[in-house]
Amino acid sequence: MTSFFAFLAASLAEIGGCFSFWAWLKLNKSVWWLAPGTLSLWIFAYLLTLVESDYAGRAYAAYGAVYISASIFWMWLVEGNTPDRFDIIGVLVCLIGAGIIMFAPRV
């Protein structure tokens, strides 16, 4: 359960951090947007170390699905663009893949 919350918090930190750079470069916001964005990306990196996994690569791979899911929700809730059926199907496929990566029995 710790991994779930670490992934969720990491996705919010990463998306928030990346969005600050997006806002600065694409939306002509102040360069000061980079300060909280950089801090947010540091927090993101730390949070990924809390994931219960013996291998960083496996944790990062599974995190990818959480990031994709959170990105679609960000697009919907923050940017006001409703996900279409292909967005939803893609998220479900990714989450199933992440579940296989994280919870499959290892030999």
Image: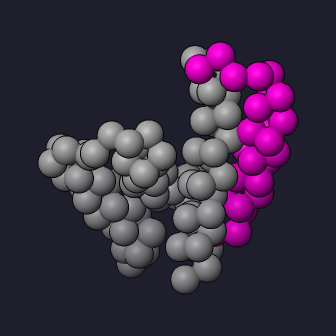
Residue at the (44%, 40%) spot, across then down: 79
**55 is within the stretch colored magenta:** no
Q: Position of residue 60 (x, y in %)?
A: 55, 52
The residue positioned farthest toward the bottom in the image shown: 1
Residue at the (75%, 47%) spot, across then down: 40
20 lies above or below 72: above
Residue at the (59%, 73%) spot, across then down: 5
Q: Which one is nearer the viewer's eye here, 6 or 76?
A: 76
The type of colouring in the image is one colour
In the displayed structure, does residue 15 sit left or right of residue 30? left
In the displayed structure, does residue 11 sit left or right of residue 70? right
* Main secondary structure along the magenta-highlighted residues: helix
In the displayed structure, does residue 43 sit left or right of residue 86? right
Q: Position of residue 103 (x, y in %)?
A: 41, 75
Q: Which one is nearer the viewer's eye here, 94 or 40?
A: 40
Residue at the (71%, 61%) spot, across then down: 47
Q: Quadrant of residue 80?
A: top left
Residue 56 visible within the image: no
Image label count: 0
**Figure quadrant of the C terminus:** bottom left
Q: Position of residue 22 (x, y in %)?
A: 60, 26
36 lies above or below 102: above
In the displayed structure, does residue 39 sit left or right of residue 93? right
Q: Position of residue 72 (x, y in %)?
A: 38, 47
Q: Which one is nearer the viewer's eye here, 9 or 61?
A: 9
Residue 62 visible within the image: yes
**29 is within the stretch colored magenta:** yes
**Figure quadrant of the N terminus:** bottom right
Q: Quadrant of residue 18?
A: top right
**Residue interval drawn in magenta:** 27-51
